[in-house]
Image (cartoon, rainbow, N blue to C red):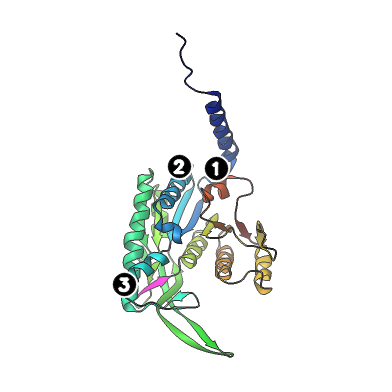
Amino acid sequence: MAETPITSSALRSDWLAKAEVLTEALPFMRRYSGHRIVVKFGGHAMGEAESIQSFANDMVLLNQVGACPVVVHGGGPQIGAMLNKLDIQSEFINGLRVTDAETVNVVEMVLCGAINKSLVGALQQAGGSAVGISGKDSGLITARKISTAKGGSNIEEAVDLGFVGEPDHIDTRVVDALISAGMTPVIAPVAPATDGATYNINADTAAGAISAAMGATRLLMLTDVSGVLNKDGEHIQKLKITQARALIADGTINGGMIPKVETCIDAVEGGAEAAVILDGREPHAVLVELFTEHGIGTIITKD
């Protein structure tokens, strides 16, 4: 009796296609081997177990091909859910959460506790080695307090946002040490100021400052859109800094995309090689961006 073939021709074709993909990706894997890639992960995808595990698999693969990923995460929806559960009222002004002493304690608990450790656990489950830290660890981030303005009829007043800050100084030694040990840092964006108070920092801003201080080869900003769009709603693949600023000035880049683009500009001007805004909802978005010829996001580079 003839033996049944172990593999079908269709299955062989599938294997060959996968091998071809790997062959095409190899030059890009070599390109990023030994290079630092800062990835900002956040949004509603962080609340979905499948999305978190997919992201973790991608980070582990980056590490296994020689790249050095650094994850900076947010957690706005999760913070909001916990505040509601604790019946703590929360107000936003110009997109920033007003953060009093009670609220910042909840922010730190959620970011440094539940979210940070769930991401670390996902990376470990995917076969990686990850360590969760915050801006407080080894003086990674020193914060400074920020305020905003609101008002109407051309009259604005300064508004105290409470314990909301931005990076004033970055000391990357703890991140460098973890990378040298083959571990992936997973960073929660809370940090002390010089007065010892704890401040909540926007994850985009923290990721930009860290990538600049590290001289990262890429800052990848995972968002809920495909990248920067032109006036016709078409995706823009590449932008120089002057072009990006011109699009902000003429209103093409508007709303919530403005601070993301400005963060990318600051990161590149501060020392990062390039920054990319891409849709984190796309399957394996990070791998497609880094390991294919054209990527899927909008890359911002120096002039």
Amino acid of disc 1: Met
Q: Is residue 269 magenta?
A: no
- Residue 89, quarter of the rendered image: bottom left
Identify residue for label 1: 29
Residue contact between numbered discs 2 and 3, judged by CB atoms under 8 Å: no
Q: Position of residue 162 (x, y in %)?
A: 39, 80
Quadrant location, the C terminus? bottom right
Which element is circle 3 on?
A: helix
Amino acid of disc 3: Asn
Relative height, residue 155 to residue 226 (above, below): below
Q: Is residue 198 magenta?
A: yes
Q: Earlier in the sequence, mark 1 or mark 2?
A: 1
Residue in the image at 34% along x and 51% along y: 121
Q: Which residues are magenta?
A: 197-202
Q: Earlier in the sequence, mark 1 or mark 3?
A: 1
Identify residue for label 3: 105
Which element is circle 1 on?
A: helix
The numbered disc on residue 61 is none
